[in-house]
Image (cartoon, coloured by chain):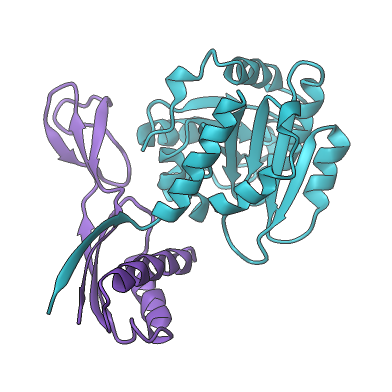
Chain colours: A cyan, B purple
């Protein structure tokens, strides 16, 4: 029986679209972040606070991924950013073609930094490139403190980790030192921010870093690893 | 649950190749899946068989999966080692500076057809 070599990455079709997206955005001098976490870690709240704090300093656009509803996009729009909502109708992750379609609805001339808020899920989004420059994984103190060890791929493919809800540390059994250690064992180059989107603690350092990232100063050190 | 989307991508890649080769039936498909790729191979096989059963060219096709270990090359002591649970520390010199050698693959390698 004849055999033929295929030698093709299974997600090649997705990766090709992702590359096109990255080229388009880079040519427009837009930096792109794929923001991932489990449901409820605070991705949308982080974006709301970030947009408020950087108003007038950095023009931000957001592609909001959710399985259903447009409520997150409404929150982001109210905070004052260019926003497009994607509803995956059941799919557990965003794919590059969804981003390509969403970009057609964003005025790229108006933005310098684009966030793609992925579906709340610490498993599937790790496998799909979306044309981002970097990936950020978010954890929060109301989840268990073994997330990096339990979902290592997500922490391995990210360049930045944000731990949210640190204002609740006195009330929850969350050993933040353990989380830091686990995450750095999986990914020694991970940049870590510890914040509370509720009190604002830690957000100044995050925003400062974000401005440097958007204007290219920290970009070279943070190329997405294959 | 993303194994269904991955199986769909495999079926599409194989269908393209089958059309290119004028294949009447695809009998087997070989994959390389790295152990750190996040793919659950049992689920992937289940999803592939389900999709193949709905496709006249792929019906009954068998999926063969070669699993590749998660390995790294240590830049500090130049040894190669197996990464366990994603913890990328060199067991020989205890350093953390290394390059991934294998384990993240998701490849369609070849197909058998008639």
Q: Quadrant of the N terminus of chain A?
A: bottom left
Q: Nearer the viewer, residue A171 or A222?
A: A222
Quadrant occupied by the C terminus of chain A:
top left
Residue extending farthest to the right is: A78
How many marks can you see? 0
- The residue that appears at 75% across and 38% down in the rendered structure is A45
Compare residues A108 and A185 and report the one nearer the observer: A108
Residue A163 is left or right of residue A5, and the answer is right
Measuring from the top left, give residue A158's x and y in whole percent: 47, 36
Q: Image quadrant of residue B18?
A: bottom left
Position of A152 relative to A27 (above/below): below
Q: Residue at x 72, y 22 (%)?
A: A201
Classify residue A218 as left or right of residue A12. right
Q: Is residue B8 left or right of residue A192?
A: left
The spot of residue A98 in percent (x, y) is 61, 53
- Percent position of residue A52, x then y: 82, 26
Q: Position of residue A225 (x, y in %)?
A: 38, 34
Q: Is residue A44 above or below residue B33?
A: above
Q: Nearer the viewer, residue A3 or B80?
A: A3
In which quarter of the view is residue A217 placed?
Answer: top right
Check the image and report above or below for A165 versus B35.
Answer: above
Q: Is residue A176 visible?
A: no
């Amino acid at each position: 029986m004849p055999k033929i070599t295929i030698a093709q990455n299974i997600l090649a079709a997705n990766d090709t679209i992702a590359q096109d997206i990255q080229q388009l955005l880079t040519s427009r001098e837009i930096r792109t972040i794929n923001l991932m976490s489990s449901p409820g870690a605070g991705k949308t709240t982080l974006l709301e606070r970030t947009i408020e704090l950087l108003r007038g300093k950095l023009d931000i656009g957001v592609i909001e991924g959710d399985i259903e509803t447009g409520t997150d996009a409404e929150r982001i729009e109210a905070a004052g950013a260019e926003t497009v909502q994607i509803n995956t109708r059941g799919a557990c992750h965003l794919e590059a073609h969804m981003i390509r379609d969403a970009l057609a609805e964003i005025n790229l001339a108006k933005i310098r930094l684009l966030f793609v808020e992925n579906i709340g899920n610490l498993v599937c989004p790790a496998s799909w490139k979306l044309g981002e420059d970097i990936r950020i994984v978010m954890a929060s103190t109301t989840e268990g403190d073994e997330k990096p060890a339990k979902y290592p791929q997500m922490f391995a493919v990210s360049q930045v980790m944000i731990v949210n809800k640190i204002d609740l540390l006195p009330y929850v059994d969350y050993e933040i030192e353990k989380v830091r250690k686990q995450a750095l064992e999986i990914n020694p180059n991970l940049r870590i921010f510890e914040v509370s989107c509720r009190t604002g603690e830690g957000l100044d350092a995050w925003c400062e870093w974000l401005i440097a990232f958007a204007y290219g100063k920290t970009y070279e050190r943070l190329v997405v690893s294959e | 649950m993303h194994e269904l989307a991955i199986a769909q991508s495999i079926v599409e890649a194989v269908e393209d190749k089958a059309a290119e080769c004028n294949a009447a039936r695809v009998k087997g498909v070989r994959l390389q899946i790295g152990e750190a790729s996040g793919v659950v191979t049992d689920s992937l096989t289940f999803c592939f068989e389900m999709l193949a059963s709905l496709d006249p060219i792929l019906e009954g096709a068998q999926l063969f999966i070669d699993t590749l270990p998660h390995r790294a090359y240590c830049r500090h002591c130049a040894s190669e080692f197996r990464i366990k649970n994603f913890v990328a520390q060199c067991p020989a010199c205890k350093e953390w500076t290394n390059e991934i050698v294998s384990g993240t693959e998701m490849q369609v390698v070849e197909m058998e057809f008639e």
